[in-house]
Structure formats: structure tokens, C-alpha cells
Image (cartoon, rainbow, N blue to C red):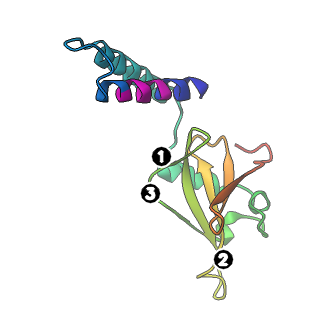
Amino acid sequence: MRRICAVFAGVLLLLGLTACGGGEEGTSSAGTLAESALSQLEEAESELEVMTVEETVERFKSLSPQVLGLEGNSLQEYEVFHQQGSVPVDGVPCLEVTVYGNNQTDTNTPLGTYLYARDGSALYQLDVNSDTIIRLDLGGKN
């Protein structure tokens, strides 16, 4: 993961230098370096085992409700909705998932919003009021 972040930072720096004319006129060394860094980033990303959205949601639903601070025996007792796309947290792409109750009184009230790593390695709870996240312990279940 550090490798990906380092390569990504290098790509951004090189692209910034290229855009600002950070190289001598008539040379393409900055462009060549940027292409090389982009290639390394693509290679590092391919090493990640990122699940599809559907796989991520299914893996999330297999978590214990207690990990999320909820009651019950299974997340199948709740309504789970996700946002398309990834949200990066600590350099890891995460899927935003909101959990709602599954009865007549709790259907319009979110019980929690979570960011679940697309590789299953981390889980965060999102406090939408303060726009902060808290890392939750997966309890050995990844």
C-alpha cells in the first residue's frame, strides 16, 4: 500500500512539474518520467485484490451486526444500501454503505453509514454530522 501511495505521489509531482514547464524546453524527460510513474501506479493497482461492488456488499452483509454497533444476529435483518464508486480512506478504496432498520418504524432512518474497504481489510464508521470517520475493529473477520 505504501508503494502505491509513493508512486501516486510521484505521479502527481511529475505531472505538476510537466504542467508547469518543469523541464527544459524541447525535452520530454518529465513526460517520460510521468509515463513511467503512471505505469508503475497501474502495476501496483493491479496487485491489489479489489472486490467488485457486489462482492464488497455481500462481504459487508456477512459481518456481525455487533461489529457495526447494531443489535441482532445477522445484517440480513437490516436494509443495506451502497453508493456507487469508491471513497479513498488511508489510501484504500472503500465503498460507502448505509444501514437502515428493517421494520416499519426504522425504514427512513439510517442506523449507520460505513466505509468498507474494497479489499475487505478495513471498516470505518462515518459520522455524517461531523464528517469524521472512526476505524472499527473487524473482530478478526476480513
Q: Which mark is residue 12?
A: none
| Left or right: where 21 falls relative to 80 | left
- Identify the secondary structure beneath mark 2: loop
Image x and y of residue 86, in percent? 49, 49
Residue 84 disc label:
3
How much space separates mark 3 and mark 2, taking CA atoms? 21 Å
Q: Is residue 18 above or below residue 60?
A: above
- In the figure, 111 relative to 9: above or below? below
How many residues crowd mark 3 within 10 Å: few (<14), some (14–19), many (20+)?
A: few
Asked if marks 2 and 1 touch (Cβ < 8 Å), the reply is no
- Residue linked to disc 2: 101
Residue located at (64% from left, 78% from top): 102
Quarter occupied by the N terminus? top right
Query: Image quadrant of residue 61?
Result: bottom right
Task: Say how many tags the image has.
Answer: 3
Q: Identity of the amino acid at label 3? A: Gln
Determine which of the numbered discs, if any, sits on residue 52 in the image: 1
Could you tell me the amino acid type at mark 2? Gly
Amino acid type, callout 1: Thr
What secondary structure is marked by label 3?
loop
Q: Are marks 3 and 2 in contact (CB under 8 Å)?
A: no
Q: Earlier in the sequence, mark 3 or mark 2?
A: 3
Q: Which residues are magenta?
A: 9-16
Query: Would you identify the image quadrant in which residue 14 lies?
Result: top left
At 67% from the left and 55% from the top, the residue drawn is 133
Q: Residues within 10 Å of mark 1 (few under 14, many from 20)?
A: few
